[in-house]
Amino acid sequence: MTATGVQLGLRNLDGKQHLAVADVTAMLRSFSSIWQGWAATGHADLDPHTVGLLGSALADFADQLDVEAIARTAPTTGTGR
């Protein structure tokens, strides 16, 4: 089993620590890939179908986070947003 290769950089904003959305989504996608690798190579007692569903759910969640982050950082065009 390997550790994730994602570097998480905490940022100090107004005295609070925050993770960049890109770091979080990369981590979620990395977990999905690692789990699927374990199941495919038999290095864990994981059901490949279940791992596939969990991996897909993590990737979908990462996509949702990306979309929300883009929507919140996109410049407004004066259309009431």
Image (cartoon, grey):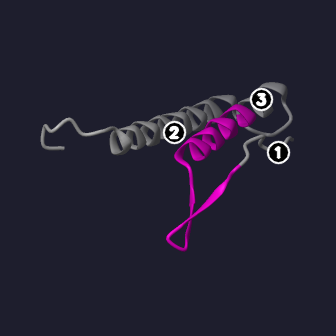
Frontmost residue, 42 versus 27: 27
Question: Residue at the bottom extreme?
Answer: 15
Q: Are marks 3 and 2 in contact (CB under 8 Å)?
A: no
Q: In which quarter of the image is residue 15?
A: bottom right
Earlier along the polypeptide chain: callout 1 or callout 3?
A: 1
How far apart, in angstroms, are the residues tagged by discs 1 and 3? 12 Å
Frontmost residue, 7 versus 79: 79
Residue 37 disc label: 3
Residue 3 disc label: 1
Q: Where is residue 63 in the image (x, y as percent from the top left)?
A: 47, 34
How far apart, in angstroms, are the residues tagged by discs 3 and 2? 19 Å
* Mark 1: amino acid: Ala
* Mark 2: amino acid: Ala
Which structural element holds mark 3?
helix
The label nearer to you, 3 versus 2, is 2
Q: In which quarter of the image is residue 33?
A: top right
Q: Where is residue 1 in the image (x, y as percent from the top left)?
A: 86, 41
Which structural element holds mark 1?
loop
The label nearer to you, 1 versus 3, is 1
Does the segment drawn in magenta span residue 36? Answer: no
Q: In this view, does 57 lie to the left or right of 68?
A: right
Q: In which quarter of the image is residue 2?
A: top right
Which structural element holds mark 2?
helix
Q: Which residue is drawn at 64% across and 59% down?
A: 10
Q: Where is residue 79 in the image (x, y as percent from the top left)?
A: 13, 37
* Disc 2 packing (10 Å; few <14; some 14–19; many ≥20): many
Read off the residue under disc 2.
62
In the image, the segment drawn in magenta is 8-35
Q: Position of residue 18 (x, y in %)?
A: 56, 60
How far apart, in angstroms, are the residues tagged by discs 1 and 2? 19 Å
Frontmost residue, 40 versus 32: 32
